[in-house]
């Protein structure tokens, strides 16, 4: 027996089809959702991601405001672009692509919280900790949406997260322990004494350590769902956190590429549409 594939690419397609109708409904009411991106420098990976995001937007009727700055851009220059997008009504949501090489906390904090479609503004993460509705981070929500669409049970499940990074592991623990998800979470990190023993308890394992192949077959409970969030490059190719032979014991696995990456984009699109819908609710 081999694991069922959690196909993020086809799920992104399905979500785009659903969002197309919501964007059309917004446009009928005179609201055109517009995504802004702020990109600093010429990292090819970052350029690929930002291009992909704008292509996704164009497909479903979201307009694009693209601000590309050279690697030499200063903190003040990037902050001026953030201020400009904060004040532009055509921009209903935007993000600063990471990494920038600048003071990222200062940049994140400067984005108007209601335009923070990455869900990473300190105020939005604070609302998450306090249990109030706010934009949520795209990669964690992409993981959850992928599990939901394949009917992997989350409520009551033991979820083992590997990695405490600010964009995935840390917020994911907060989200999965809400009443609406109701999972029991173990958050592992470099201080974890026996990683294999922790991972073996997981009905769901979410690997977001950025260490190629850190999750091996012997660590996985038979039938578990294993999500691979890690993006490392080995010889120019994407290497995930999950070793390929994990599929021999797992019940479900997300491929990488083709799993959580496209789902991150799907949830970004969802956040853009929701921010635009919320702007109507607030002005009505
Ligand atoms: N402010 C900010 N927001 C982000 O959401 C953000 C960011 N900064 N910095 C970098 C990470 C990374 N990220 C990905 C998006 C899409 C894929 C994706 O769609 N990958 C494809 C193809 C990958 C390939 O072939 O190169 C896949 O997994 O199938 C991956 C990774 C968003 N990030």
Image (tube, rainbow, N blue to C red):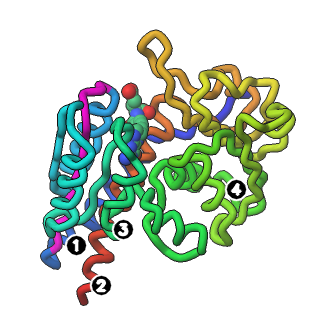
Q: Name the residue under label 3.
A: 113
Q: Distance between the residues labelled 4 and 2?
A: 35 Å
Which residue is pictured at 76% across the width and 37% down the height? 191
Left or right of 181? Residue 56 is: left
Q: Mark 1 points at which residue?
A: 25
Q: Does the residue labelled 4 lie within 8 Å of ligand 1?
A: no
Residue 224 screen position, x and y as percent: 74, 40
Q: Name the residue under label 2.
A: 282
Residue 37 screen position, x and y as percent: 24, 48
Q: Distance between the residues labelled 3 and 1?
A: 24 Å
Q: How far apart are marks 4 and 3 (CA)?
A: 32 Å
- Vertical side of 282 occupied by 31: above or below: above
* Camera sees residue 235: yes
**Span highlighted in magenta in the image:** 31-44
Between disc 2 and disc 1, whose residue precedes? 1
Q: Which of 211 and 110 is in front in this view?
A: 110
SS under mark 4: loop
Q: How far apart are marks 3 and 2 (CA)?
A: 14 Å
Between disc 1 and disc 4, whose residue precedes? 1
Tags 4 and 3 touching, CB below 8 Å:
no
Q: How crowded is mark 1: few (under 14 residues within 10 Å), some or many (20 or more)?
A: some
- Vertical side of 232 occupied by 33: above or below: below
Between disc 4 and disc 3, whose residue precedes? 3
Q: Nearer the viewer, residue 197 or 115?
A: 115
Residue 24 screen position, x and y as percent: 20, 67
Q: Does the residue labelled 3 lie within 8 Å of ligand 1?
A: no
Q: Name the residue under label 4.
A: 153
**Figure quadrant of residue 221:** top right
């Amino acid at each position: 027996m081999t694991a069922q594939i959690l196909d993020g690419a086809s799920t992104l397609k399905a979500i785009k089809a659903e969002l197309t109708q919501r964007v059309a409904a917004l446009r009928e009411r005179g609201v055109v959702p517009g995504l802004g991106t702020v990109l600093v420098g010429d990292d090819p990976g970052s350029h690929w991601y930002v291009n992909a995001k704008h292509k996704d937007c164009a497909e479903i009727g979201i307009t694009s405001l693209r601000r590309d700055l050279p690697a030499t851009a200063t903190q003040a220059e990037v902050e001026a672009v953030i201020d400009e997008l904060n004040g532009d009504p055509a921009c209903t949501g935007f993000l600063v692509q990471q990494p920038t090489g600048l003071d990222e906390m200062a940049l994140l904090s400067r984005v108007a919280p209601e335009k923070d479609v990455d869900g990473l503004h300190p105020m939005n993460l604070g609302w998450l900790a306090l249990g109030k509705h706010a934009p949520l981070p795209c990669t964690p929500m992409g993981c959850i949406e992928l599990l939901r669409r394949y009917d992997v049970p989350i409520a009551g499940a033991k979820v083992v997260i590997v990695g405490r990074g600010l964009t995935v592991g840390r917020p994911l623990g907060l989200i999965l322990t809400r009443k609406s998800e109701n999972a029991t979470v173990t958050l592992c990190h470099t201080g974890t004494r026996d990683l294999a023993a922790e991972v073996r308890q997981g009905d769901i394992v979410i690997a977001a350590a950025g260490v190629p192949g850190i999750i091996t077959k012997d660590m996985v409970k038979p039938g578990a769902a294993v999500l691979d969030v890690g993006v490392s490059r080995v010889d120019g190719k994407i290497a995930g956190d999950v070793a390929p032979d994990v599929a021999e014991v797992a019940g479900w696995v997300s491929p990488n590429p083709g799993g959580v990456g496209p789902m991150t984009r799907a949830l970004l699109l969802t956040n853009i549409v929701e921010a635009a819908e919320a702007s109507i609710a607030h002005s009505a």
